[in-house]
Amino acid sequence: MSDSPVTGYYRYTDIWFDCFPNPEDGAALKAILAHDAIVHPEHPLHVEGVKGVQLFIGTLETGEARLLFSSKQVDYIRYWLHAMGMTQEPIPLPWSDCLLEKSELRTITPTNYEDGGALRRAVKDIDRNNKRLKGLNPTLESKRQNFGKISSLWAEKKGAWLAADFEAWEMDSTYLTEFGHSLVTFKDGQRLEDRREHFIVHEARSYINSKYVPDYRYKYQFGESITLPRRDFKQRIQHLIETLMQSGPVYLIMHDNNQDLKYFRKNLQMPLDGLTHIIPEKAPESGLIAVDTSDLMGALLGEDSGNRTGLEKMCRLLHIETPYHHNAGQRCACKLSIENAITLTADLFRIQFTLQALITMAEGGQVDRQREERWPNSTSGTSLRVQVKPSPDDPDYESDDDGAAIGPVLGYDPKTGILYRTDVDDDEEETKPIS
């Protein structure tokens, strides 16, 4: 394709049905844009590295979505048809009212369609979801808007994305015991750094959790934990955030962030000056932006009741496994390779936990299409709410009270040598040895 700039976007249906100045040109245009033709690797709109065709899903101010061509794609097809002798003159552009400028769209998400069937289904799925958006709960609408913004901001590859988590003593939450973080930074569109650290408070070593939550502070899997006096613990965290903010925007990522923000402000006396919960349309030059993965998951699940999906359940639904859930560093960064669960060692933990959940959703595409790909045919009637059904091929799956299928988590007890399966909800846990 040419290097001409994108000046706006055209509705897929406008180009398909309305861009025909005469029958001969219309036939040529329909042939080149036919569902099975446009996904071919030798098609003129083919993008290197993309299987099928890359189009765009844009969200209007009403919240409705539209399947779009970019103006660059439309221009290229017009001139390509003329250069190949398929039209006498370049097909004229649709009238100016058909052009959607970037300012008219809340979000624009590049979306790949591997085959003609996927493209045909996309038009129907978008139309069906648009009908469900009428009278949408304002809270869910806000979550959906933020989902699209986060996807766009992550694609800009700017600033620092910092997933953070605290653990406190179960008998008195004013006694912090741990802090963990996972960090990705970008500069000039390049991913510079993936770093993670885990701090343990020296004075809190005797405050052991066991009654309500397990204590996994010494089971960090990414290297050595750092034990610090309480004063240094606070200074290291404060220095981390202040340093990152000097180089651009910082996205502070937490799951259901109310409690963790209280830890920052009350326990560490860190006011987090300038922190905003308003997700910007474009990456700012600086600032501290709160990102809550429970809100993103709510948008993806179509949850409009105010309920929040727990961190571990979210990761299971996104196929991110989570051993040692109550370790502050692990909550930010971990994945267990189920195939190798019996050899539970640090090199098996490959990706971030809270951060990976954000990346998985941010890179997964437009929210409605992503929902359909993850949980096909999981919505009914006029509701966007996901009702994931257990797989009939997996007898270990049971449906929780939200209708979401929750699978078993595998792990390995290094003390006993027993490989175990843990069937867990957010409020209860049952461990079964695997014979």
Image (cartoon, helix red, strand yellow):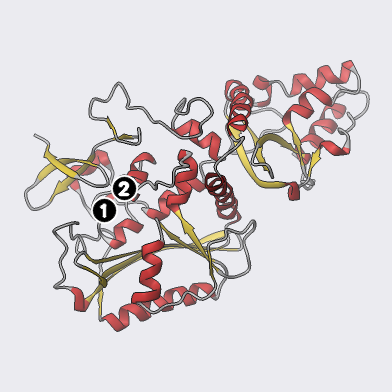
Give me the residue at 47% from left, 50% from top.
Answer: 295
Q: Is mark 1 on a helix, strand or loop?
A: loop
Pick the residue in front: 211 or 215: 211
Residue furthest bottom as drawn: 231
Q: Does residue 198 lie above or below 3 as drawn?
A: below
- Residue 15 lies in what quarter of the image? top right
In the image, what residue type sits under mark 1? His
Pick the residue in front: 230 or 25: 230
Q: Does residue 392 lie above or below 220 as drawn?
A: above
Q: Is mark 2 on a helix, strand or loop?
A: helix
Give me the residue at 45% from left, 39% from top.
Answer: 301
Spot occupied by residue 143 in the image (x, y as percentages of width and height): 53, 48
Spot occupied by residue 177 in the image (x, y as percentages of width and height): 24, 70
Spot occupied by residue 112 in the image (x, y as percentages of width and height): 59, 34
- Residue 213 lies in what quarter of the image? bottom left
Q: Which tag, 2 or 1, sits closer to the chain's start?
A: 2
Spot occupied by residue 54 in the image (x, y as percentages of width and height): 64, 35
Q: Does residue 298 lie above or below 119 as drawn?
A: below
**Disc 2 to disc 1: CB gap under 8 Å:** yes
Name the mark on residue 312: 2
In the image, what residue type sits under mark 2? Glu
Is disc 2 surrounded by few (<14), some (14 to 19) or many (20+) residues within 10 Å? many
Name the mark on residue 325: 1
Tell me if 54 is positioned left or right of 225 in this view: right
Residue furthest right as drawn: 88
Pick the residue in front: 158 or 233: 233
Query: Label 2, label 1: how many angstroms apart (C-alpha)?
Result: 7 Å
Name the mark on residue 346: none
